[in-house]
């Protein structure tokens, strides 16, 4: 049952995000990704029982160059986005990530509209703030 609810949550979110003008790809098991901003970097929604997160995923950031360039602007970025973000280097892995978290889970169907609105707003803000920075350094 939870897997069916999660799949429905992601399908509805993806459709709403597309309607809002976001360039979405098909959802995965517990995430809904946008198309790459630059090769190897994309924004996604990830979903857990206790939280939903909007993420900037830098899949090919072995040298941490993308992460470090963005981290230098973190105060400006966080102020523009309006959220405190988690900045994750993920030592020992190629990937780095930057996340905004809403501490509410997907199992409360009555909260889906608000969660989806928050995630779409955050994905737009991530696209607005991270997109130009990544494109100018690519």
Image: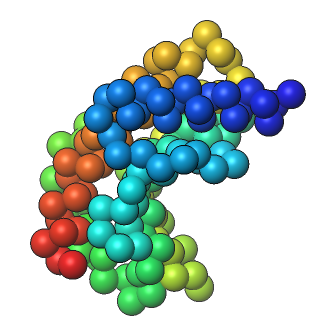
Q: What residue sits 67% from the left and 40% below the top?
A: 48
Asked whether residue 118 appears in the rendered view, the answer is no
In the rendered image, the quadrant that contains the C terminus is bottom left
- Residue 49 falls in image quadrant: top right
Q: Is residue 43 left or right of residue 101?
A: left
Q: What residue sits 69% from the left and 48% below the top?
A: 29
Q: What residue sits 41% from the left and 81% below the top?
A: 61
Identify whether 47 is placed above or below 117. below
Identify whether 102 is placed above or below 39. above
Identify whether 115 is placed above or below 134. above
Identify whether 68 is placed above or below 9. below
- Residue 124 falls in image quadrant: top left
Asked whether residue 52 appears in the rendered view, the answer is yes
Count how many numbered circles sit on residues in the image. Answer: 0
Q: Residue furthest bottom?
A: 63
- Work out whether residue 108 or residue 11 is closer to the camera in this orientation and state it: 11
Residue 10 position in % (x across, y down): 60, 35
Q: Residue furthest top?
A: 110
Q: Is residue 106 left or right of residue 130?
A: right
Residue 108 position in % (x across, y down): 67, 17
In the rendered image, the quadrant that contains the N terminus is top right
| Figure coloring | rainbow
- Work out whether residue 54 or residue 22 is closer to the camera in this orientation and state it: 22
Q: What residue sits 47% from the left and 49% below the top?
A: 25
Q: Is residue 53 left or right of residue 50?
A: left
Residue 83 position in % (x across, y down): 32, 40
Residue 13 position in % (x across, y down): 51, 30
């Amino acid at each position: 049952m939870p897997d069916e609810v999660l799949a429905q949550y992601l399908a509805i979110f993806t459709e709403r995000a597309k309607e809002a003008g976001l360039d979405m790809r098909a959802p995965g098991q517990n995430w809904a990704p946008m198309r790459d901003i630059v090769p190897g970097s994309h924004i996604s929604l990830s979903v857990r029982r206790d939280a939903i997160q909007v993420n900037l995923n830098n899949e090919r950031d072995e040298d941490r160059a993308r992460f470090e360039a963005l981290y230098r602007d973190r105060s400006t970025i966080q102020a523009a986005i309006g959220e405190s973000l988690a900045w994750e280097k993920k030592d020992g892995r190629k990937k780095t990530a930057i996340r905004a978290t809403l501490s509410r889970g997907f199992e409360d169907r009555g909260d889906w509209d608000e969660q989806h609105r928050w995630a779409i707003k955050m994905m737009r803000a991530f696209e607005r703030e991270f997109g130009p920075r990544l494109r100018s350094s690519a």
